[in-house]
Amino acid sequence: MPALVRMNGIVKKFGDFTASNDVDFEVESGEVHALLGENGAGKTTLMNILYGLCIPDEGEIEVGGDRVELNGPADAIEAGVGMVHQHPLLVDRLSVVENLFLGGVGNGTERGMREAIAQVEARFPLDVDPQALVEDLPMSKRQRIEIVRCLARGVRVLVLDEPTAVLTVDEVGDLFGEMRLLIESGHSVIFISHKLSEVARISDRVSVLRGGSMVGTWRTGETNPSALAQAMVGEQVTPACRDGKPRVGAARLTLRGCSVTDDDGQDVLQGVDLEVREGEIVGIAGVEGNGQKPLAAVTQGVHPPTDGDVLLDSDPLPPIEEWKRRRVKLGRIPEDRRKEGLTLDAALWENLLTGPQCPDTGRVFSKRKMVERARVLLEEFGVSPPDPMRLAGQLSGGNQQKVIFARELWSDPGVVVAVNPTRGLDLRAQREIHQRFLTLRDQGVAVLIISTDLDEVTALSDRIGVLYAGRLDGPHPAEEIDRQQIGLLMAGLSRQSEFDTEGGGLL
Amino acid sequence: MSRALAGRGDTVMLIVRTGVALLGAALVGAIFLLLDGVDLAFAFEEILNQSVGSSFAIKNSLIDAVPITLVGLGVAVAFRAGIFNLGGEGQIYMGALAAVLVVLNLSGLPGPLLILLGLVAGMVGGGLWGGIAGGLRSRLGLSEIITTIMLNFIAFWIVSYLVRGPIQDPGGAGYPYTEEIPTKAELPVIGGMIPLGAVLLVVAAALIWVLLERTRMGISIKSLGAGEAAGRFAGLKVERTGFNVLLIAGLLGGLAGAASLLGNEGRLSDFFSPGWGFIGVMTALIGRGTAIGTLVAGLMIGFLTSGISGAQSAAGIPTATAQILLGVFVLFLIIVNTDVVVRYLRRAAASLRRAER
């Protein structure tokens, strides 16, 4: 059978970063093709290229055997490619019909639209009250509206971008039913996911991307989770840079049965127990969206857990507003250095004076003295140039991160919690920051690193835990867990999993 | 070294900007004056005379500068935190009301004490008004843009009611104002030229400068103004800071009311403020939210206001045209201080320097 979609030699670079490195990808008609990969593996870039949101530097795209130039979503839809986003791009305050109308369904008249929808419904039921407001609908129904919108516009290939991440277990079942319906009516589905169990359950074939390159494509029934996990996480890229056994002391940061329920009532963190001890680095791996944010929030004092305790030594960790007054010494490297970490419009010396780790300044300070102290600190932390009058927004990402380290380590805290500390940094800056963590560890600091970069976690950690769906597995001593096992845990399986080859499901 | 030069460049640029604005406003203003058949040269000379031509003129100009600059400083502090205090009018009225009540009821006290109590009462009255808006914002999340405007109406009508009833001057032939304050409660004028209100002004500007540039609270305020996320992450008390800046704005607005009452007006009426609360917002905008900038802008508008209104009768400028002229000046000053224009001028200056080399 000829390929419905063929992407050939796709190259896409963002500056020095290669998001797609000579990628070949094919989708046959009538199949569910899973696209698997870690964060930053290039799944989204590849699909954005297929949907016309992103124009490749090199490579060709064919849909239905015809070469196409995709300069925008309109071109993609014209060619027969549609995309359903994880959070559907609908206007919440408008009704289902109004949204379909805005989505370009039909010929612009109400009657035309009704006919178009009726045609779709013959094969694929909308199953939603057309007059309902989108804001009143659950996420699964919203995704359904997007699917109908695509179908009504004659799309043959549907890209579903991690649709299950926002669905409940029952809704996932419904979605898979819908996907089968789509296949039966001759459509193809590209299913982006990092959950191996779902991939095994629904897909006919699976392709794995890693670091922007295509690792391979397999028939789902002919592979197994270990092989896929291995393909996904690959070999260690950066060699383990720690050396020597950690000289571990007492527990400094302790989590006991920590759970967090978010505003939507979802349990985003469930019963996490964790100890970070003097002189060790504990790394928490996991695919983004599996509880990293709430874990960071409770360990960095942004908000307390809904349930359970966070202890610094033996005292409950106070809310962040109290830290300055109570001299809580815990360094925090936030996930988003540009939004949370720094005030970009302010000078570096002012940024250094923000937050709880800076020394007392007295009621009214001398700017000259503060700027001088800032200069010494910036030099010590290798910020270049060490000019305290510069605005934070004028610095490179690596230098910005160093400024945050300088500020957070100013009080010599005994505990440091970092979230994705090297995301988006170049290799040199990455190495410098990794070295900084190792130095801290050797000085007896308790370090917790929550990172979606598996290389980073394995290179630095003395103990490794894995977050999946809000639960923490481990942490296990680094010697006792290998990359492949971590990969399986990240994908929601146990450390020893096999596909049930006969049923096509999982044991 | 390079920073020092850059700093000087900015000052030069500021002077150039202001010069351009004054010139542009004079040109546009001249059109209106010509339409009224006014002798241009004489009119501008007279405006200059009436704003800085004598110690008497300077005194009047400074008196005009006092309320708008004090309100402007409050607006500026709030502005730096990303909060819009449009409640200057209400804060002025409540401040003046508190001051007049204290001064009239404690008139047995010695003058200096009476003045001090009057000014403090003014700050309490204005602070209360600013504090209400601050509390509504920090506790209930109500937009201060709405509440400060609404509180303006409430303050105005409270005063309007009182000066037409309970505290109306019995010998005032039914006019809606209070009795005049005793002479000993009037703010002195130093050397016949510098009203005490102007001294207050400089002190207030200095305090606000220290607050914004030399304290951690100032850094918090500016950091919140630049975006809340970093401040929240750093553990700043975001709601509390929002309350604080509105309280400070209220204190300054109240002081503006009290200082004008004791320094110039002498009695409270329901036509006490000719819109100082809003002119103060423009003052802070022209001053780009800094203490010194607001001080300079306030003085400039004060001198322009006094000069133009003083020149009216001598130069035969109709009242409406005088107001238009003042409006044109303020508008031009705001225009040259918008980011777009500032950036454009910086770039132009940079390319000029390159061309020289």
Image (spheres, coloured by chain):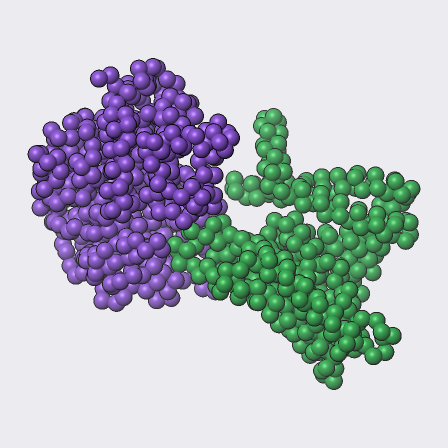
Residue B166, above or below A224: below
**Residue at (83% x, 54% y) in the render:** B309
In this view, which residue lies farthest toward the top?
Answer: A66
The spot of residue A446 in percent (x, y) is 22, 55
**Residue at (31% x, 50% y) in the render:** A293
Residue A126, above or below A6: below
User: In which quadrant will I find the C terminus of chain A?
Assistant: top left
Q: Is residue B262 left or right of residue A324?
A: right
Residue B256, above or below A118: below
Judge by depth and name the residue closer to the eye, A421 or A386: A421
**Residue at (61% x, 49% y) in the render:** B288
Judge by depth and name the residue closer to the eye, B121 or A145: A145
Q: Judge whether residue A329 can be spotted in this image.
A: no
Chain coloured green: which letter? B
Q: Judge whether residue B335 can be spotted in this image.
A: yes
Q: How many marks?
A: 0
The spot of residue A466 in percent (x, y) is 19, 47
> Which picture quadrant has residue B192?
bottom right
User: In which quadrant will I find the N terminus of chain A?
Assistant: top left
The spot of residue A409 in percent (x, y) is 32, 53
> Which picture quadrant has residue B210?
bottom right
Judge by depth and name the residue closer to the eye, B241 or A10: A10
Q: Is residue A480 left or right of residue B275?
A: left
Judge by depth and name the residue closer to the eye, A203 or A256: A203
The spot of residue A17 in percent (x, y) is 32, 29
Chain coloured purple: which letter? A
Q: Is residue A333 left or right of residue B134?
A: left
**Residue at (53% x, 60% y) in the render:** B142
